[in-house]
Image: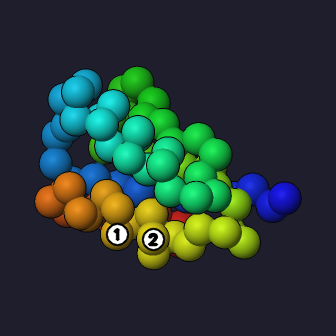
Amino acid sequence: MNISDILIHINESLNEQQRSALEEAVRQIEGVVAPRFNPGKEHLLLVAFNPDVASTATLLTKVQSFGYNAQLIGG
């Protein structure tokens, strides 16, 4: 299994509950291994995923489906 990481920058300031809900929603995407926000970098969602199963476009679309303005970094 291949594992890649992608950063998704979210323009909005999210509270802890919003970040947790977003991590859980992204975790439900097939091929996602570990989505997480790091303390002090609450605008950056790091997602470890299997690129053979999930695409970066799918990950970004999920974040945007919450109504957030977001962009891929390094994708």
Looking at the rendering, which quadrant does residue 8 occupy? bottom left
**Res 44 visible:** no
Q: Is residue 61 left or right of residue 47?
A: left
Visible in this render: residue 35?
A: yes
46 relative position to 32: left or right: left
Secondary structure, mark 1, is helix
**Which residue appears at 31% of the width and 58% of the height?**
63
Q: Is residue 15 left or right of residue 35?
A: left
Residue 60, position in %: x, y?
A: 39, 66
Helix or strand or loop: what does disc 2 sit on? helix
Would you call the spot at circle 2 few (<14 residues within 10 Å), some (14-19), or many (20 or more)? few
Name above or below for residue 62 compared with residue 24: below
| Coloration mode | rainbow
* Residue appearing at x 63%, y 58% in the figure: 31
Q: 10 Å neighbourhood of mark 1: few (<14), some, or many (≥20)? A: some
When the figure is inspected, residue 58 is found, relative to residue 33, above or below; the finding is below
Q: Are marks 2 and 1 in contact (CB under 8 Å)?
A: yes
Residue 49 in the image: state x and y as whole percent: 64, 55
Along the line of sight, which residue is nearer the eye, 5 or 53?
Answer: 53
Identify the residue under disc 2.
58
Residue at x-position 33% and y-position 43%:
22
- For image coordinates 17% across by 40% down, the residue present is 13
Question: What amino acid type should be assigned to the residue bearing mark 2?
Answer: Thr
The image's mark for residue 29 is none
Viewer-nearest residue: 74 or 21: 21
* C-alpha gap between disc 2 and disc 1: 5 Å
Which mark, by number, is residue 61? 1
Instruction: Please state the total of marks drawn on the protein image.
Output: 2
Looking at the figure, which quarter contains the N terminus?
A: bottom right
**For the residue marked with disc 1, what is the amino acid?**
Thr
In the rendered image, the vertical position of residue 40 relative to residue 45, given as above or below? above
